[in-house]
Image (tube, helix red, strand yellow):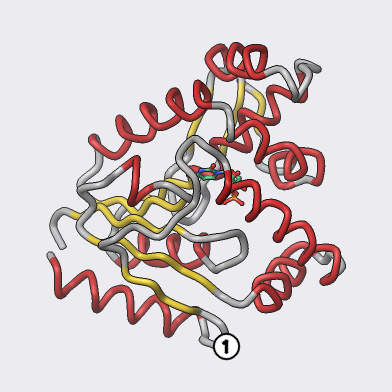
Amino acid sequence: PEKCVVAVDGPSGSGKSTVSRRLATRVDGVYLDTGAMYRAVTWAVLQAGVDLNDPDAIAKIALETELSIGTDPAAPHFAANGTNVDEPIRGVEVTQAVSAVAAVPAVRKHLVALQQAIIAGQPRIIVEGRDIATVVAPDADLKVYLTASSAARAQRRSAEDASDVKATEADLARRDKLDSTRKADPLKLADDAIEVDTTGIGIDEVVTYVLNLLNSKV
Ligand code: C5P
C-alpha cells in the first residue's frame, strides 16, 4: 500500500511486537512501539525516585522526560533524557512498575498526543499497544487484536527473556488485569477490530494473514 495505518492491540505476549515489526518491514513502513514509550517514561520515574502512589509526581516526570523514539522496525532504539534505555525498559523493575505509570491519565494524554503526531507524519506505520484502535488511531485502516492462551503467551515471553514460565504467566496475568480494568483507556477489543488468536499458529502465518487483510482494505 502507498499509505496505511495499522493498529495492533492485545495483551502482553500475544505476539504484537514480532508481528508488528515484520509487518512494518513488509510494507516498507515504520513501527511504533507505544509500550516502549510507557516503559521509557517508567524508567525515568524510577530514576527520579518518585513514589508510584503519587500520580501528580509521576505525571510531572512524564511531561519533563525527553524521549527519543526509534521507529525503525529492524532497530527501534529508545532514549530518555539522552540515555539509551533499550535494556533497562525490558528489565523487571520497569516491567513491575509500568502498569501503574500507564494508569495515570495525564501520562496517557501526553503520550497519546506524541503517538498521534508521529503517526500523522508517516505514510505507512504499524502501531502496537493496548488502546491504538480505541483511542490513539480510531481511523486506522486496519485494526488487529491479537490474543493467545495465557500458557502460550507465557511460553513465548519466557523463551524471549529466559525467565521462569510459571512466574512469567503470573506476571502477565497481573499486568493484563491492571491494563484491562484501569479507568483511563483500558485494554479492550474495538468494535471494528479483527481478533486473531495466535495460539499454536506460527508468526509467519499470522503476518501473512494480516498482510492479506491489509491488502484487501487499502
Ligand atoms: O507492550 P508492553 O508489554 O511493552 O507494554 C508495557 C505496558 O505499557 C503495558 O502493560 C501497559 O500497562 C502499558 N501500555 C499501555 N498502553 C499502550 C501500550 C502499553 O497502557 N498503548
Front residue of this view, candidates 185 and 156: 185
Residue at the spot 66% in from the left edge and 25% down from the top edge: 83
Residue 191 drawn at (x, y percent): 29, 60
Q: Quadrant of the N terminus?
A: bottom left
- The quadrant holding residue 78 is top right
Q: Amino acid at mark 1?
A: Gly
Residue at the spot 82% in from the left edge and 66% down from the top edge: 162
130 on left or right of 136: right
Residue at the spot 76% in from the left edge and 17% down from the top edge: 50
- The quadrant holding residue 117 is top left
Front residue of this view, candidates 44 and 139: 139
Front residue of this view, candidates 170 and 182: 182
Residue 29 drawn at (x, y percent): 30, 54
215 on left or right of 87: left
| Label 1 secondary element | loop
Find disc 1 in the rendering and name its residue: 200
Residue at the spot 59% in from the left edge and 30% down from the top edge: 79
Residue 39 drawn at (x, y percent): 63, 38
Front residue of this view, candidates 60 and 56: 56
